[in-house]
Each structure stands twice: as C-alpha cells, then as structure tokens.
Image: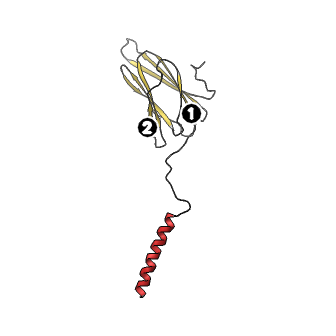
Amino acid sequence: MFVRKYKNLGLLIILLSVINTSSHPYPIHEESYRTYPIHSVSFNPRGADVISAICIHWYDYTQQEKWTDCNIKIRSPTSYTSPDWSIGYKLSIHTLFGTFHIDPILWWDGWVGGKYCNDIHLYFKEGGTDLVLAFKLYIVYDNKCFWDK
C-alpha cells in the first residue's frame, strides 16, 4: 500500500509537469520572420555594350542568399526597393566575356533613408582585349544618384 501511494504520487507529478509545460502562458517560439528598414537600390550600367544580365541577390538575416532577381534593365538606369526581410545584397554582372561578382553590401538596420547608387562602368583596356569593371557604390540621402535627373 505504501509503495502504491508513491507510485501514484510519481505518476501524478509527471502528469502535472507535462500539463504545466504544455500550457505555459508565454511559450517560446523561434522567430522565423524578421523585418528591416526598406532601402532603395539603383543601378547605372554604362560603358561597353557587353552586359547580358545583371542579377541582384538579396540576403536574409542569416547572411544567406534568399532571393535572386535577374530582370534588371541593362541599357538604362533603374531602381529597386529591398524586401523588408533583407539585410543587404550582392550583384553579379554577366557579360559576353564572363561574370563579375560584387562583394555583399550589408546594411542590417543602418543607412536608413539612404539610396544605394551602384555605378557599373564596363570598358576595355587599351588594345581592346581585356574587359574591366569600374564599380563604385555611393550612398546618398537626397534620393538622387548622380545619373538621376
């Protein structure tokens, strides 16, 4: 009889602990969606007419590529708005002679209100055999890149 009471008491304690953890008023959930400030990203492809595609690779909070868009205009300046989950981006410029990769540009929560102006200037070195990328990034706060009118 004495052993039976302890056995029942043990089962009751286990049952109460299971009920208590499953009905906790503030359950802990892993955050799966994070938001960051929206940024404007502009492109100005110019110079040698050899670009076949420009791709923007958006990064999420794990600094992994989450989404890629290769529909960027290659013959005129254009702008994109970042997704609210993005902490930055990188570019790949595909040409008839190969692909140029630009290092990731990460903003996290910084440079809020800034416009990211990506000046993509492709030209041939003297002699015309080597294609060169002169890439410059400007962050402006008047919402106008130097090529905007």
Q: Find residue 30 and report its horizontal and vertical position in percent.
A: 49, 52
Q: Residue at x 52, y 59 (%)?
A: 27
- Kind of residue sitting beneath label 2: Glu
Q: Find residue 17 and report its horizontal and vertical position in percent.
A: 48, 70
Q: Find residue 82 and report its horizontal and vertical position in percent.
A: 53, 33
Q: Residue at x 47, y 75 (%)?
A: 13
Q: Find residue 7 and report its horizontal and vertical position in percent.
A: 41, 80
Q: Quadrant of the N terminus?
A: bottom left
Of the image marks 2 and 1, the number of the one nearer the N terminus: 1
Residue 65 numbered mark, or none: 2
| Residue projecting furthest to the right | 142
Residue 39 located left or right of residue 54: right
Number of numbered discs visible in the structure rendering: 2
Q: Residue at x 43, y 21 (%)?
A: 133
* Label 2: how many Cα within 10 Å (few below 14, some 14–19, many 20+): some
Return the residue nearer the eye: 71 or 39: 71
Q: SS of the residue at dot 2? A: strand
User: How far is disc 2 from disc 1 in space, using C-alphas?
Assistant: 17 Å
Return the residue nearer the eye: 30 or 147: 30
Q: Residue at x 51, y 38 (%)?
A: 87
| Residue projecting furthest to the top | 127
- Rendered image quadrant of residue 40: top right
From the viewer's perspective, is residue 85 above or below residue 101?
Answer: below
Q: SS of the residue at dot 1? A: loop
- Rendered image quadrant of residue 68: top left
Q: Which residue is mark 1?
A: 39
Return the residue nearer the eye: 38 or 111: 38
